[in-house]
Image: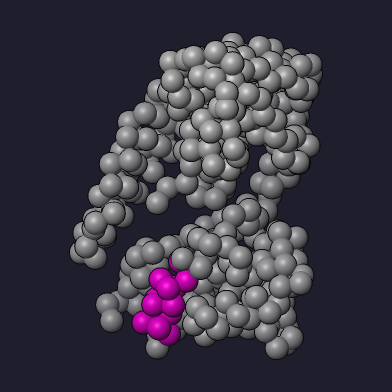
Amino acid sequence: MKKLLLSAAALLPALAFAQTGKFTVQGQLGKINAPAKAYLQYRKDGKIAVDSTVLKDGKFTFTGDAGATPMSGYLLLNQKGDAMKKSKDYHSVFLEAGTITVTSPDTLKNATITGTKTNKDNADLQVALKPVNDAYAALEEKQKNATDAQKEALTKEEKAIEKQESAINKKFIKDHPGSYLSLSALQSFAYSADYPELNELYSGLSPEIKATETGKEFGALLPKLKNVALGATAPEFAEADTAGKTVALSSFRGKYLLIDFWASWCGPCRHENPNVVKAFNKYKVKNFTILGVSLDRPDAKAAWLGAIHKDGLTWTQVSDLQFWKSKTADLYAVRAIPQNFLIDPQGKIIAKNLTGQDLENKLEEIFGKI
């Protein structure tokens, strides 16, 4: 099922990125009183910050230091006031210098957030994304009781919705080159889009956006994305396998090879592994194999080996056990997992991120039906 919908939308003046100051979040949620509590959670300087306050006549206020760029966060409401983690009523918010106003007759879910440019424009984008949200919700209901025969059709339906969502967000990026959150939207595409499209979108961003720390980081990522674009020769690497023996990518030359980035701690990876196992067992009789590259932690070799055994991953597995500092993951510009690259016998990248039935479909296209 889909990831959380991207709520990236902002039209920030170019000079706004140099501004800092205080943010104030003022809320009015009907006439709700104690013990109800409102919580504010956001990330600042790489750390999670959490604040809370008791509601009085539906009112609450949060204040804090705004950063040089908008900070993405969540407002949460717990009517019992006993714990933030029990809050099921929430709303995203962008924190920046100024006063942010949150109003609703009842819940945070139904709140309107205004008062700063980022939040106003985000609200406008969410209106544009409403058909997508509704379509995802309807699809989720269909998936609950779907038969195996129906699931393939629903997968196609999901891909159509994802395509619609992607088009809306891409249009936003092109229409708002001076928005910091256009860059956030672009970052989300780095997983699924290929280099030419990403480079075009990045090139269209304003100089001010490119000059932000995040903008510079994405600019530095582009050459790596180019190196693993479709049609490029897969960059050479060598890592130790489960027995400590060094395995080089070039040793697989002459075969179709799926380079599969995953980790024992990655829930979506473990969920996808049965599909990978199925495809491997079906096509290993052909000129096809897999090379697993794990992003497990330095102290988690036992967990890595245990996951390999439990999930039945019988192909070659390598890892430098450096978590997100994995040299191979960095070389391949991997910023989310599961992620994979299909390499042809000459070492060229011919497909990316083949999950579910897509992997089998691609292999059937290459080798024919088995």
Q: Is residue 277 magenta?
A: yes
Task: Depth check: give the residue in front, 74 or 197.
Answer: 74
Indicate the colouring scheme.
one colour
Question: In the figure, residue 368 lies in which quadrant?
Answer: bottom left
- The answer to whether residue 209 is visible is no
Residue shown at the point (40%, 51%) measured from the top left: 1
Question: In the figure, residue 354 lies in which quadrant?
Answer: bottom left
How far across and how far down the image is residue 12, in percent? 64, 17
How far across and how far down the image is residue 290, in percent? 52, 77
Q: Is residue 201 magenta?
A: no
How far across and how far down the image is residue 114, in percent? 54, 13
- The answer to whether residue 134 is visible is yes
Residue shown at the point (75%, 29%) measured from the top left: 211
Q: Is residue 75 left or right of residue 324?
A: left
Q: Is residue 30 left or right of residue 316?
A: left
Residue shown at the point (77%, 70%) measured from the top left: 298
**Residue 203 position (above or below residue 326):** above
Task: Depth check: give the residue in front, 167 or 251.
Answer: 167
- Quadrant of image for the C terminus: bottom left
Q: Residue furthest front?
A: 35
How far across and how far down the image is residue 195, in percent? 57, 48
Q: How many marks?
A: 0
Residue shown at the point (28%, 53%) measured from the top left: 143
Q: Is residue 175 left or right of residue 118?
A: left
**Residue 84 position (above or below residue 52):** below
Q: Which residues are magenta?
A: 272-284
Query: Mostly what secondary structure, the magenta segment?
Result: helix
Task: Depth check: give the residue in front, 186 or 116.
Answer: 116
Q: Is residue 168 left or right of residue 225?
A: left
